[in-house]
């Protein structure tokens, strides 16, 4: 299976140049059955990467460009009167897909943002009292632009908590930028992106990743990391139990991508910053001194004692 996951990453990396680490983390989130929030300036390839993943993984995809007039019904669907049956007919919204690309999610109203909450957490939507399951797998890849915040609506903590990871692509280096321009001189590599898996195979990969063994000592270590965020004086609101569960799932997926059927403290530390930072609400003092959540996460990772893998109990 490691060969298959490597093939997936190589195919996406053929389209997105010089961002191997980000590509790996997005695949990790998908295998961990999580959602991804990409925060970056326009034009760095966020949308292209989402489309590349959709084609490589054989996923049905829909894209919503969020604006101030986007309605909740555009996302979850709505019911209309059917003259022939005399009843209401459900019209699916954008979430009825495998991969939903939510472009600039911070440019719509909080009411529309909240329409995604049930879909992201429970993989279902409720319209007019009727609950409908979403396709499997279901992944939200949302983007937001931190520059030009006028007219934007910050995501509430309850919704940020639904994203497994928050990532930033950043600008490519000079070599990658030059290769990008050369490769797109005559054609777009996205047009030749081939499918490596289908939905059934991806679900199987995800199940195998989530079957990764986690020792009791590692569960305790994750709980101690979460507890440390709740008692840090610079943090107003620490990791929730959902956040601790997210670290566990991400650590399993990281071990799976490394070709192991067991997780280690190194897997936890590898995913801790991307899973935890966006979930923290910093104190006024921390914001005043321009302390970032990632700095605090790094400090906590240093302070909490890492368990010795040699002392782990066997399966």
Image (cartoon, helix red, strand yellow):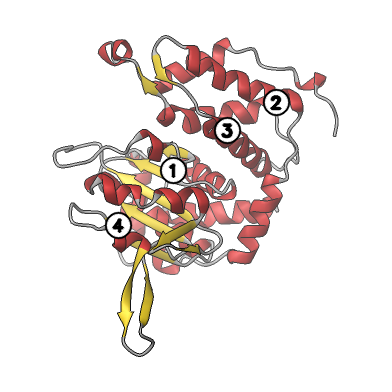
Q: Secondary structure at mark 2?
A: helix
Mark 2 surroundings within 10 Å by alpha-carbon count, few (fewer than 14), some (14 through 19), many (20 or more): many
Say above or below: 90 vs 98.
below
Task: Residue 157: name its quadrant.
Answer: top left
Circle 1 residue = 19
> If you read the primary sequence from the N terminus, does the residue marked by circle 4 or circle 3 appear first?
4
Residue at 68% over, 43% down: 256
State the separation of the CA atoms marked 2 and 3: 11 Å
Circle 4 residue = 72
In the orientation shown, which residue stands out farthest toward the front? 86
Residue at 42% over, 62% down: 129
Circle 2 residue = 218
Horizontal and vertical percent for residue 277?
43, 27
**Can residue 189 be seen by looking at this rendering?**
no
Q: Nearer the viewer, residue 291 or 96?
A: 96
Residue at 80% over, 23% down: 312
State the separation of the CA atoms marked 1 and 3: 23 Å
Of badges 1 and 3, the one in the foreground is: 3
State the separation of the CA atoms marked 4 and 3: 30 Å
Q: Secondary structure at mark 1?
A: loop
- Asked if the residue under mark 3 is in contact with the one under mark 4, i.e. CB atoms within 8 Å, the reply is no
């Amino acid at each position: 299976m490691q060969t298959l996951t490597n093939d997936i990453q190589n195919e996406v990396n053929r389209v997105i140049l010089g961002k191997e680490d980000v590509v790996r983390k997005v695949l990790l989130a998908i295998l961990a059955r999580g959602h991804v929030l990409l925060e970056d300036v326009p034009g760095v390839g966020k949308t292209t990467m989402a489309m590349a993943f959709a084609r490589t993984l054989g996923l049905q995809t829909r894209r919503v460009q969020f604006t101030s007039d986007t309605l909740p019904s555009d996302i979850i669907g709505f019911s209309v009167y059917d003259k022939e049956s005399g009843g209401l007919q459900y019209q699916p919204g954008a979430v009825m897909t495998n991969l939903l690309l939510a472009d600039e999610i911070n440019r719509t109203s909080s009411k529309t943002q909240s329409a995604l909450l049930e879909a992201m957490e429970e993989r279902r939507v409720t319209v007019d009292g009727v609950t409908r399951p979403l396709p499997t797998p279901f992944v939200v890849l949302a983007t937001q632009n931190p520059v030009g915040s006028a007219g934007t609506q910050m995501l509430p903590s309850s919704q940020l908590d639904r994203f497994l990871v928050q990532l930033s692509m950043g600008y490519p280096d000079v070599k990658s930028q030059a290769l990008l321009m050369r490769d797109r001189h005559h054609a777009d590599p996205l047009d030749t992106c081939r499918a490596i898996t289908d939905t059934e195979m991806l679900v199987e990969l995800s199940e195998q990743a989530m079957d990764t063994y986690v020792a009791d000592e590692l569960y305790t270590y994750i709980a101690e990391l979460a507890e440390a965020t709740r008692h840090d004086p610079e943090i107003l609101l620490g990791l929730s139990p959902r956040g601790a569960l997210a670290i566990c799932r991400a650590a399993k997926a990281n071990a799976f991508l490394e070709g192991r059927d067991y997780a280690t403290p190194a897997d936890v530390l590898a995913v801790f910053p991307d899973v935890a930072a966006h979930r923290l609400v910093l104190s006024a003092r921390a914001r005043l001194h321009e302390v970032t959540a990632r700095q605090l996460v790094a400090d906590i990772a240093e302070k909490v004692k890492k368990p010795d893998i040699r002392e782990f109990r066997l399966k």
